[in-house]
Image (tube, rainbow, N blue to C red):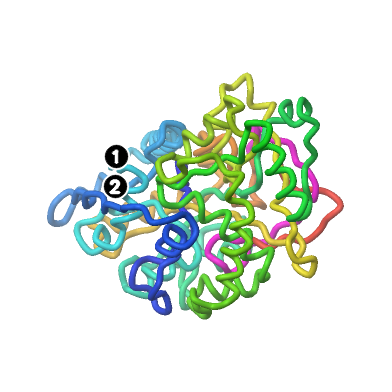
């Protein structure tokens, strides 16, 4: 995800119902106008006509060191098990995101990394993916909800690999030192942000990569307008010019005076490093993000809390949790080899390899799960999660015990 693969929930350009993209809306209305340059096209990959049946190519957006190393270990394990070769073509994460349409219509790799839900379904509807229902027939362990996130028109196209919730992260020691308390309501959150800014440690904020701000947008929208409206907006069933969307930005504006300056020129890594250096006091991030910017001996100091309640009728019951995984391009030159790789990636055997991040969760919930190495401690409230039908949001209901983390 970001990364790790951490984009927000924007439908690809040209998706039905999305004349105004969320990325443009966020950059323009919320953050101010900033010049955006389209990155270079992804270079064409492949092994020529017919391809090499003993080699599977993988288009990877895992360009950051931690996930790149972990995926390399997973692919190496598959090579050892199968005797086949996996050729990984890693591209800058943001370049991959921006050019996915042209990539799939050009000369894509056999397998590529992407996201579940609507972001997968869009390409399935366009005929750019290979169906893998036969691969899913061999799986035993994915929940019905995860299967739904991998399905379009009754057929499967996606193999989940991991998911990660988003929350508000901070250093425990800084909160103790300053006497800060974790807020549960928007008013408390704004009051805390104001105090942090006055103390010289503002709220971390970044959007040079084009996706980090989207997590905050999603949370404010779900807390202000409810999960059902958010889901409908993501599906193109609601307009981005709806008054409810305007209210999201009006509410968000209350927080902006307390952000660190220069967000449009700051990467998510730099924002994470600011949190580590105590230059900022809290940040809205996905689970893998902050820990990857902290030295190992400081990760136990990372804590987090749920994004605060805005409208009591919606509470804090919706959780942002993108699902990342693998798909097969329609133009794959080795569909048989690609399916064999995905079949292995979706089974417990690959669990003996390294997770793409030490702070993500394996999705195969009924299969054997490796010990958690998350550096974070669960804070209130506790949740019982089930994936929603939104592209990356999960609904959560109050539970007496937390099933993970």
Q: Quick one: SS at disc 2?
A: strand
Residue assigned mark 1: 85
- Furthest residue to the top? 297
Residue 74 occupies quadrant: top left
Q: Position of residue 340 (x, y in %)?
A: 38, 52
Give the overall secondary structure of the magenta segment: loop
Which residue corresponds to the image point at 43% horizontal and 79% vertical from the top-left?
A: 17
* Mark nearer the N terminus (1 vs 2): 2
- Residue 272's place in the image compared with 141, above or below, is above
Residue 170 occupies quadrant: top right
Which residue corresponds to the image point at 50% horizontal and 65% vertical from the top-left?
A: 117
Which residue corresponds to the image point at 13% horizontal and 56% vertical from the top-left?
A: 49
Q: Position of residue 204 (x, y in %)?
A: 57, 40
In terms of depth relative to the viewer, which is nearer, 385 or 174? 174
Residue assigned mark 2: 56
Magenta range is: 370-393
Q: Is residue 344 left or right of residue 105?
A: right
Tell me if I can see residue 371 in this picture: no
Q: Position of residue 133 (x, y in %)?
A: 45, 67
Circles 1 and 2: CB atoms closer than 8 Å: yes
Q: CA distance from mark 1 to mark 2?
A: 6 Å
Residue 319 occupies quadrant: bottom right
Q: Quick one: SS at disc 1?
A: strand
């Amino acid at each position: 995800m970001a990364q790790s693969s951490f984009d927000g929930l924007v439908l690809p350009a040209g998706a039905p119902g999305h004349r105004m993209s969320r990325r443009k809306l966020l950059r323009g209305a919320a953050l101010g106008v900033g010049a955006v340059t389209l990155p270079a096209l992804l270079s064409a990959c492949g092994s020529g006509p017919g391809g090499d049946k003993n080699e599977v190519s993988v288009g990877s957006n895992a360009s950051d060191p931690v996930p790149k190393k972990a995926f390399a270990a997973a692919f190496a394990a598959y090579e050892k098990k199968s005797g086949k070769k996996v050729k990984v073509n890693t591209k800058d994460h943001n370049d991959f995101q921006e050019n996915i349409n042209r990539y799939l219509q050009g000369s894509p790799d056999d397998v590529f990394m992407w996201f579940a839900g609507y972001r997968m379904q869009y390409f399935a509807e366009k005929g750019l993916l290979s169906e893998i229902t036969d691969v899913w027939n061999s799986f035993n362990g994915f929940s019905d909800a995860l299967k739904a996130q991998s399905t379009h028109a009754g057929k499967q196209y996606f193999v989940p690999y991991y998911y990660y919730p988003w929350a508000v992260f901070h250093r425990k020691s800084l909160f103790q030192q300053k006497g800060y308390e974790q807020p549960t309501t928007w008013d408390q959150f704004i009051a805390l942000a104001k105090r942090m800014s006055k103390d010289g440690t503002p709220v971390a904020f970044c959007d040079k990569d084009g996706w980090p701000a989207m997590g905050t947008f999603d949370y404010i929208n779900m807390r202000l307008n409810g999960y059902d409206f958010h889901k409908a907006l993501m599906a193109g069933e609601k307009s981005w010019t709806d008054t409810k969307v305007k209210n999201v930005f009006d509410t968000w504006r209350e927080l902006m005076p307390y952000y660190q300056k220069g967000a449009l020129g700051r990467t998510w890594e730099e924002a994470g490093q600011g949190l580590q250096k105590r230059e900022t006091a809290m940040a809205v991030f996905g689970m893998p993000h902050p820990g990857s910017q902290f030295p190992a001996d400081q990760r136990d100091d990372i804590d987090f809390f749920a994004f605060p309640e805005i409208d009591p009728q919606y509470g804090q019951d919706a959780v942002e949790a993108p699902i990342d995984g693998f798909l097969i391009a329609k133009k794959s030159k080795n569909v048989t080899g690609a399916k064999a790789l995905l079949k292995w990636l979706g089974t417990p055997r690959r669990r003996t390899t390294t997770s793409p991040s030490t702070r993500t969760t394996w999705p195969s919930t009924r299969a054997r799960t490796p010990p958690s190495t998350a550096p974070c401690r669960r804070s209130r409230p506790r949740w019982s999660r089930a994936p929603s039908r939104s592209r990356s949001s999960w609904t959560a209901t109050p539970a007496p015990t937390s099933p993970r983390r």
